[in-house]
Image (cartoon, rainbow, N blue to C red):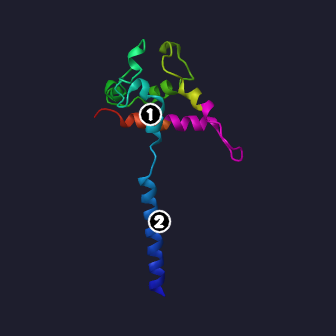
Amino acid sequence: MKHVKNRALLLAMLMTVCTGVTLAAGKIDIGKKEYVSNCVACHGVTGKGNGPVAEILKVPVPDLTEMSRKNGGVFPFARVFESIDGRQQFQAHGTRDMPIWGTSYKSSGSPEHDDYPYNAESFVRSRILALIDYLHRLQAK
């Protein structure tokens, strides 16, 4: 009887581990998806500022892989968040050449079903944070 319980426990643990590995293997990189959907046209696939639209813009597109290096080796999280969110414009920052993704995310984020609590600000913030995580991973070593 003890052997049967041990085998059942071992089987249950094995199934849990295998399921977790399978889910991890099929993991979606939300930050990369956000980047490809919203940033590649200007910033390029590698983040170097050489996207297909970059050459027709009036201002040079920044190299996103150099943000940490240009900030003393520290990723400028707050500045990046404010640039992406863009709903708070600071007079000292000048005009906004980049689209305001915070507003765009909020308008595209309404739920299809009303049967659960929904917080638009949380939705916007999570998409921006996923994108920032991806940008952090793009930093030159």
Q: Residue 120 at what x, y percent from top left? A: 63, 36
Q: How far apart are marks 1 and 2 (CA)?
A: 33 Å
Q: Name the residue under label 2.
A: 16
Q: Residue 23 at what x, y percent from top left? A: 46, 56
Graded by Cα atoms within 10 Å as few (under 14), some (14 to 19) or many (20 or more), the crowding at tag 1 reads: some
Q: Which amino acid does label 1 sit on?
A: Val
Residue at 42% over, 15% down: 57
Q: In this view, does 10 lie above or below 4?
A: above
Q: Is residue 52 magenta?
A: no
- Report which quarter residue 117 is drawn in: top right
The span shown in magenta is: 106-128
Q: Is residue 123 magenta?
A: yes
Graded by Cα atoms within 10 Å as few (under 14), some (14 to 19) or many (20 or more), the crowding at tag 2 reads: few
Residue at far bottom of view? 1
Residue at far front of view? 52
Determine the secondary structure under disc 2: helix
Q: Mark 1 points at which residue?
A: 36
Pointer 1 with pointer 2, Cβ within 8 A: no
Q: Residue 118 at what x, y percent from top left? A: 66, 41
Q: What residue type is labelled 2?
A: Thr
